[in-house]
Amino acid sequence: MVKALIFDVFGTVVDWRTGVSQDVATYCAEAGLSVDSVAFAVAWRNLYQPAMEAIRSEGRGYVPLDVLHRENLDKVLVDFSLDAAVGEADRVRLNRAWEKLPPWPDSLPGLKRLKTRYPIAPCSNGSIALMTWLARYGGLPWDAILGAEIARDYKPKPAVYRASAAAFGMRPEETMMVAAHNSDLEAARSAGLKTAFFPRPTEHGDNQTVDLEATSDWDVIATDMVDLADQLVD
């Protein structure tokens, strides 16, 4: 029996593409800079996995995602010919774009209903600080902040899922990982957790080709967070 739910956040609970691109657009408009803010956001996000891989398998010690985001921001500013135009204070401001991501419309009503039956928490690669500010910005009703920082490693390493379950005092099989990404659920299942999937078909824009449907027989398959709550809450 599932006794706790943990969630992927970027893409599953919040819309990173819209949030980051809007914050970049606002900054550039105020600073008098011209940039394709969506392309900038996507380029920044594309450095996410390679940066974590240096920690997962290449011997770099754990650092919070906030640090990796900042290192990646510096690289993207060079790629977009903005390196000389954006000073340190503005880089600090831009890096906080990841703390201001809008929840998908069904996220809050679904989470609030799920919370009536289960303890809920993020199992994200985001740091505790990042997840805290993101929750305050979007009103996300977590019972705790779990994930990468408590495991000192990054998903999809099994330790991240297991540490999150253990932090709730649960065995892996008593904990359900919720994600809009099939690969995340594959890793969670391999770590012994139950799994729940629903798609976010515009996470990567209107022409998205990945994670449009479940690719395995996950324990629960829903259409969105509200449907997940309908299936899990009596």
Image (spheres, grey):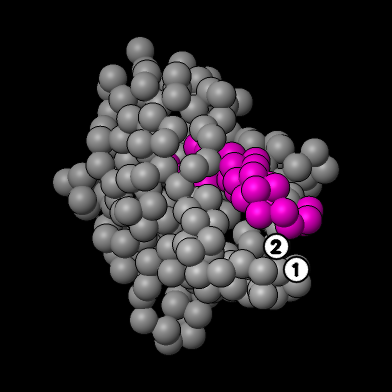
In magenta stretch: residue 41? no
**Residue 43 bears which disc, if any?**
2
- Residue placed furthest toward the right: 207
Residue behind mark 1: 80
State the residue in front, 9 or 65. 65
Rendered residue at 73%/57% (across/down): 33
- Can the viewer see residue 222? no
- Please give the range of residues in magenta: 7-36
Q: Secondary structure at mark 1?
A: loop
- Circle 2 residues within 10 Å: few <14, some 14–19, many ≥20: some
Q: Earlier in the sequence, mark 1 or mark 2?
A: 2
> Where in the figure is residue 232, as x and y percent of width and height?
40, 22
Q: How many marks?
A: 2
Rendered residue at 64%/62% (across/down): 44
Q: Locate residue 108 relative to residue 11 in the image: left or right.
A: left
| Disc 1 residue type (three-letter) | Phe
